């Protein structure tokens, strides 16, 4: 692939550099820490600064963020984010930004269409009454299909960079293992057992009582539907397993990298560390750790602390001097506010200091450690996204 960058190469150990040198970057981490926002902001920055065609593949973004990306009302199909969106943030992008939102059902249908051995099987699966229900709840269906869709888009080769958002998984590792689990499922004894009675029409001795009971409770039609569904599905076994392995290879090679997003709160951070370890253990590339919603550095400035202390400790004198400037505010009132403001600053300072210590501890965990401040408002429009993006690029 041709290098997309005309400007000098960015520093190694920067997020900028990571995005410029990889074809797939997967943002993962604990729930609610800003994975979706970070993925979108990183992709927007890569398109704006680096150029080329950049896709952000998001999973269920907040409504307002989806609007900001021009994703409203669309699913699987990639859409170009209009230059107007960049213009609203005062940016002239060098490249193009695209966005798509994963639609699990649509992706499953596409997969079935791709792998079904013939037209009849394809139609039978798509028409199977259980298929629509099961495909949505299938073993880690969401995780698997996200990886599968990523593979599909990457193979088409239309984008220089794909930034992937991941779902908030209860088990942090689910999506990493999803392709392998899918492959295992298709070769499992459970699946073989499930389809046995349908295929042979001879219920084997060991399972007979079970089927008699199941038959009474669920009805023959239901069991037949289940069996038919899995028989049809099994016809796609080879394709599925091969694809699952290909997805794994793609994620493990040097075109792909992972970033772990976290806040510096105790529980998410612990989960993020576990994530980082899991990525490394699987011999995947841990490109960066992004610490989001970090308290601003000025809280740690010793001079600012001195000011805050004075505000608190000398509130009496200061209130006397300041009250007349505040349209005749009550001196006692001003005193209380000053004390409170001063003390609050000192409290935040303690938290900011402990955050800084945690950051220092993490600095060796990945090639790149980036921190982004906590903004006063949610990141819900393109300007907010670019602002967060600038923080990611250390600007
Ligand atoms: N640096 C920030 N400052 C302020 N708000 C932020 C920041 N980063 C993200 N947010 C806000 O935090 C909320 C959660 O962000 P986001 O949806 O990106 O998290 P997530 O990790 O994708 O969540 P989930 O695990 O549920 O998918 C959003 O409302 C977003 O606007
Ligand atoms: Mg999200």
Image (cartoon, rainbow, N blue to C red):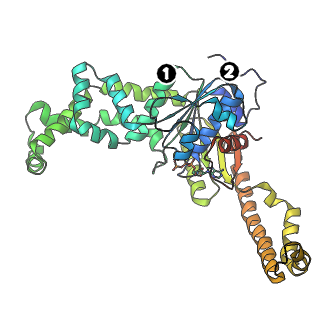
Q: Position of residue 369 (x, y in %)?
A: 70, 44
Split into 4 quadrants, where in the image is the C terminus?
top right
383 or 390, nearer to the observer: 383
Which residue has dot 2 on it? 4
Q: Is mark 2 within 8 Å of ligand 1?
A: no
226 or 336, nearer to the observer: 336
Q: Is 346 situated left or right of 164 in this image?
A: right
Residue 194 position by quadrant: top left
Return the residue found at the far bottom: 332
Looking at the rendered structure, the secondary structure element under dot 2 is loop
Split into 4 quadrants, where in the image is the N terminus?
top right
Report if residue 193 is visible in the image. no
* C-alpha distance separating marks 1 and 2: 18 Å
Circle 1 residues within 10 Å: few <14, some 14–19, many ≥20: few
152 or 97, nearer to the observer: 97
Return the residue found at the far front: 327
Q: Position of residue 140 (x, y in %)?
A: 38, 42
Looking at the rendered structure, the secondary structure element under dot 1 is helix
Residue 236 position by quadrant: top left
Which residue has dot 1 on it? 155
């Amino acid at each position: 692939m041709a290098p997309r960058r005309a400007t000098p190469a960015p520093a190694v150990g920067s997020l900028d550099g990571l995005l410029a040198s990889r074809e797939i970057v997967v943002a993962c981490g604990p729930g609610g820490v800003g994975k979706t926002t970070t993925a979108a902001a990183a992709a927007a920055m890569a398109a704006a600064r680096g150029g080329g065609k950049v896709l952000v593949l998001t999973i269920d973004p907040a409504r307002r963020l989806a609007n900001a990306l021009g994703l409203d009302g669309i699913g699987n199909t990639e859409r170009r984010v209009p230059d107007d969106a960049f213009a609203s943030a005062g940016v002239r992008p060098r490249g193009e930004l695209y966005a798509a939102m994963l639609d699990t059902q649509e992706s499953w249908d596409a997969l079935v269409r791709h792998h079904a051995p013939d037209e009849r099987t394809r139609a039978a699966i798509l028409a199977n009454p259980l298929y629509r229900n099961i495909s949505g709840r299938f073993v880690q269906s969401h995780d698997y299909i996200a990886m599968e869709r990523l593979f599909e888009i990457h193979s088409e080769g239309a984008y220089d960079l794909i930034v992937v958002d991941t779902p908030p998984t209860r088990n942090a590792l689910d999506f990493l293992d999803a392709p392998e689990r899918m492959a295992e499922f298709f070769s499992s004894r459970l699946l073989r057992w499930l389809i046995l009675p349908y295929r042979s029409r001879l219920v084997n001795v060991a399972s007979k009582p079970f089927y008699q009971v199941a038959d009474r409770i669920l009805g023959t039609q239901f069991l037949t539907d289940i069996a038919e569904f899995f028989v049809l599905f099994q016809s796609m076994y080879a394709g599925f397993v091969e694809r699952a392995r290909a997805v794994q290879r793609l994620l493990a090679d040097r075109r792909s990298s992972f970033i772990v997003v976290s806040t510096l709160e105790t529980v998410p951070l612990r989960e993020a560390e576990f994530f980082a370890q899991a990525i490394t253990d699987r011999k995947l590339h841990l490109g960066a750790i992004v610490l989001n919603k970090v308290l601003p550095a000025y809280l740690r400035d010793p001079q600012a602390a001195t000011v805050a202390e004075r505000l608190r400790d000398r509130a009496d004198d200061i209130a006397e001097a300041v009250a007349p400037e505040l349209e005749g505010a009550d001196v006692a009132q001003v005193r209380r506010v000053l004390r409170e403001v001063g003390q609050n600053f000192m409290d935040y300072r303690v938290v900011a200091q402990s955050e800084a210590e945690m950051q220092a501890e993490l600095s060796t965990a990945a090639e790149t450690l980036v921190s982004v401040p906590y903004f006063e408002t949610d990141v819900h429009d393109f300007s907010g996204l670019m602002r967060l993006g600038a923080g990611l690029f250390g600007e």
